[in-house]
């Protein structure tokens, strides 16, 4: 009987029943990031494919993107609790894509403010029903309207959040990766959290404006940052050198599409011929490149 009780005690111990804690690394003082692998979102990875994390101030914590599933959101919340006893006061969604927002419900609690671009709420309302209808089929996750939480703090141009002796400068960008991109700058560590305004290794994905994206990259590369955190890929400690591959890909698409437009080529021709020399440079090229060409072609054929 004693052995049985000991065995039951082990099986029911808090350690054996511990819930998963998202793996994060402190990449600068008080800045914690989970770096994700490069995968197509599917039923194996449940859409948990983006770099997400949090920043700790003296008073409270700001979560930056909550993850690709409610389960990842919960694991991120446990990671915060493992690092600090300070409460979460802000959840900052950098844009509308599911791999950045599906964990929101894990942080819904009194005192928590959700923050986003002033166009984010509209994008959530427009895309939410489609996202939710496909989540079970494509990602094998159960989500409902409660998982898509629009911002109650909307950034029109810029906003400063104080976490207690730690100011975060939020910037609402013009249409680029999407039409609702938000970046976060931590003054204390000279860290710029660019999210999906920057891709490394993983091919950039256009869901907004190729012209706008190039313009934003050209503006950003004039600045110096000690650390830049992309939405997908490794950390950048050699800014602006670290953005050049991303910028070159978009420039190549724009240049080749403009040539084909002048030659009177069709969209179908462009999709089969534009940017193919970049195939070996990017992960997930086959999954996203043709869509990038399609979106860029539709925009550039109307430019003056």
Image (cartoon, rainbow, N blue to C red):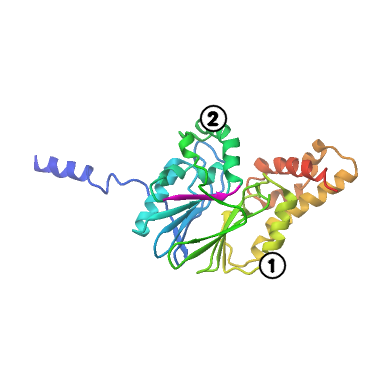
**Crowdedness near tag 1: few (<14), some (14–19) or many (≥20) residues, C-alpha within 10 Å:** few
* Image mark for residue 108: none
Q: Which residue is mark 1?
A: 222
Residue 96 in view here? no
Direction from residue 149 to residue 304 in the image, left or right: right
Q: Measured along the vertical axis of the image, is residue 188 above or below residue 43?
A: below
Judging depth in this view, the residue of 183 and 40 nearest the camera is: 183
The extreme right residue here reads 263
**Crowdedness near tag 2: few (<14), some (14–19) or many (≥20) residues, C-alpha within 10 Å:** few
Q: Which residue is mark 2?
A: 133
Q: Percent from the top left, x then y, of residue 52?
A: 50, 52
Judging depth in this view, the residue of 147 and 117 nearest the camera is: 117
- The part of the chain drawn in magenta is 112-118
Q: Residue at x 66, y 66 (%)?
A: 240
Mark 2 lies on a secondary structure that is: helix
Mark 1 lies on a secondary structure that is: loop
Q: Residue at x 77, y 53 (%)?
A: 252
């Amino acid at each position: 009987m004693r052995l049985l009780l000991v065995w039951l005690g082990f099986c029911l111990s808090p350690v054996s029943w511990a819930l998963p804690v998202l793996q994060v690394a402190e990449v600068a003082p008080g800045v914690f990031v989970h770096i994700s692998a490069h995968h197509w979102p599917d039923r194996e990875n449940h859409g948990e494919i983006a770099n997400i994390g949090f920043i700790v101030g003296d008073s409270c914590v700001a979560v930056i993107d909550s993850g690709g599933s409610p389960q990842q959101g919960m694991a991120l919340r446990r990671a915060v609790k493992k690092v600090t006893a300070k409460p979460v006061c802000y959840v900052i969604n950098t844009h509308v894509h599911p791999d950045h927002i599906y964990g929101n419900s894990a942080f819904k609690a009194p005192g928590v403010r959700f923050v986003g671009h002033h166009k984010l709420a509209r994008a959530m309302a427009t895309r939410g029903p489609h996202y939710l209808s496909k989540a079970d089929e494509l990602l094998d996750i159960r989500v409902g309207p409660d998982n898509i939480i629009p911002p109650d703090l909307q950034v029109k141009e810029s906003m400063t959040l104080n976490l207690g002796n730690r100011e975060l400068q939020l910037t609402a960008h013009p249409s680029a990766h999407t039409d609702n991109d938000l970046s976060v700058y931590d003054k204390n560590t000279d860290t710029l959290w660019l999210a999906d305004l920057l891709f490394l290794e993983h091919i950039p994905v256009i869901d907004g404006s190729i012209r706008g994206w190039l313009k934003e990259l050209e503006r950003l590369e004039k600045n110096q940052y000690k650390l830049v955190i992309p939405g997908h890929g490794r950390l950048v400690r050699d800014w602006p050198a670290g953005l050049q591959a991303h910028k070159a890909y978009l420039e190549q698409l724009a240049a080749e599409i403009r040539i084909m437009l002048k030659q009177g080529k069709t969209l179908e021709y462009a999709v089969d011929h534009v940017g193919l020399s970049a195939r070996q440079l990017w992960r997930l090229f086959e999954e996203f490149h043709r869509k990038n060409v399609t979106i860029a072609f539709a925009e550039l054929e109307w430019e003056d």
